[in-house]
Amino acid sequence: MQSLPHGWRMHNSTADVSGPPIPDAESEDGSDVEDVDIKPDSEGWEDLEEDTEEVAIQCLLCEEKFAKVDTMVNDHCRALHDFDLQEIRRKLNFYGTIRLVNYIRSEVLSGHGVPNVSSPEAWADDKFLQPALADDALLFSLDELEEPSQQDSA
């Protein structure tokens, strides 16, 4: 009869058979090897710091850049340009907001200055779903802005 693997045991009505005991953990050089707790939440496991990239959000209407979207929208654009993106967003869905931002960017970049945004038909074209400014951090940061309805109740 073949022997059982280390640490195995078999018991039935006719026999009780055990394999050889499990040897103590030793390294190849014969020294004792310390047990190591390898659970991810155990001591010694450090989370890597996430790579954080500083984002520069360019103003919709000028060249000034900001670290935070709410500073650009709520402080700078309202105060300096008398432009309230949050008020306009109140009437738009997500895609409407994307179109609006790209419409404003395209008008400003083409030298037309601050566009008239009183009529949503001006930016209704799907071409404004494409960014007017390459890697536009504002588009990636829109979700950081409070919804306009939440601002009124705050």
Image: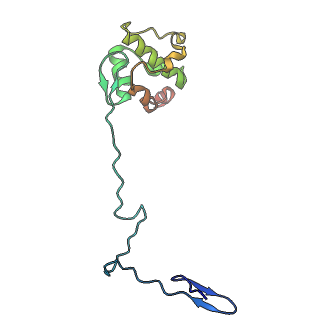
Q: Position of residue 58 (x, y in %)?
A: 34, 23
Q: In the current view of this chain or complex, which residue is farthest to the top?
A: 112
Work out which residue is located at the far front of the displayed protein and give it.
Answer: 1
Point 55% across, 24% down: residue: 93
| Residue 22 placement (x, y as % from top left) | 47, 83
Q: Position of residue 154 (x, y in %)?
A: 45, 32
Left or right of 128? Residue 37 is left
Q: Residue 99 versus residue 154: which sits nearer the camera?
A: 99
Q: Viewed as shown, does residue 43 lie left or right of 151?
A: left
Q: Residue furthest right?
A: 13
Closer to the camera in the image, 28 or 118: 28
Q: Residue at x 49, y 22 (%)?
A: 98
- Residue under the point 30% across and 24% down: 65
- Front-most of residues 29 and 112: 29
Residue 80 appears in the picture as rendered: yes
Q: How far across and how far down the image is residue 136, in percent?
A: 39, 25
Q: Is residue 94 left or right of residue 44?
A: right
Quadrant that contains the N terminus: bottom right
